[in-house]
Image (spheres, rainbow, N blue to C red):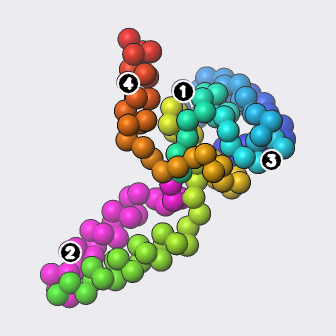
Amino acid sequence: MYVTGEDPQDFTCEHCQSSVRLEVSESVQQRSVVDRCVLCCKDLFFVQKDFNRKLGCAIVLLGAVASVYTYGASLLLAAAVDWFLYYRLPEVTICYFCNSVYRGYTPNPKHKGYDLNIGELVESAIRDQKA
């Protein structure tokens, strides 16, 4: 689902079929900068490259298996493909709490790469909340 910020409305979750109210912040509506999650209203985000992880693992696995026959040359090819994709693909913003992915928004300089400490704190808070 894509949220433009122009017309916030209720939508139905694809997984649990429950109705969810989107809370689109002023920053998203006016400047297209993500500062608060439209689903969970939290403000902790990280950025990463917009790449399919399964495809990335398949490229590495294919390079590793083929390296037996190519004497390692396929590993160089896999690294070159990885390097090319890393610099070619855009970054996405992801919510630590609900894993919502925000594509096509202006990058927020406050958001950095995934921080394991923050991730653990968030997971702990979610577990405590469920208990």
Task: Please tell me which residue is depicted at 66% across the width and 53% down the height of the picture.
Answer: 107
Give amino acid for label 2: Val
Disc 4 on helix, strand or loop?
A: helix
Label located before the other in sequence (1 or 4): 1
Residue 124, x across and y down, in percent? 38, 24
Q: Which residues are magenta?
A: 48-70
Q: In the rendered structure, which disc, 3 or 2, sits on the residue that comes first in sequence? A: 3
How much space separates mark 3 and mark 1, taking CA atoms?
32 Å
Q: Residue furthest top?
A: 131
Within 10 angstroms of label 1, few (less than 14), some, or many (20 or more) residues? few
Lower sequence index among marks 3 and 1: 1
Q: Which numbered circle lies on residue 124?
A: 4
Q: Report, in whole angstroms, how far the alpha carbon at label 1 lies from the one at label 4.
A: 23 Å
Provide the residue designation for mark 1: 16
Query: Viewer-nearest of labels 2 and 1?
Result: 2
Between marks 3 and 1 in the image, the one whose residue lies nearer the viewer: 3
Label 4 sits on what residue type? Ser
Dot 2 corresponds to which residue? 65
Q: Main secondary structure of the magenta part?
A: helix
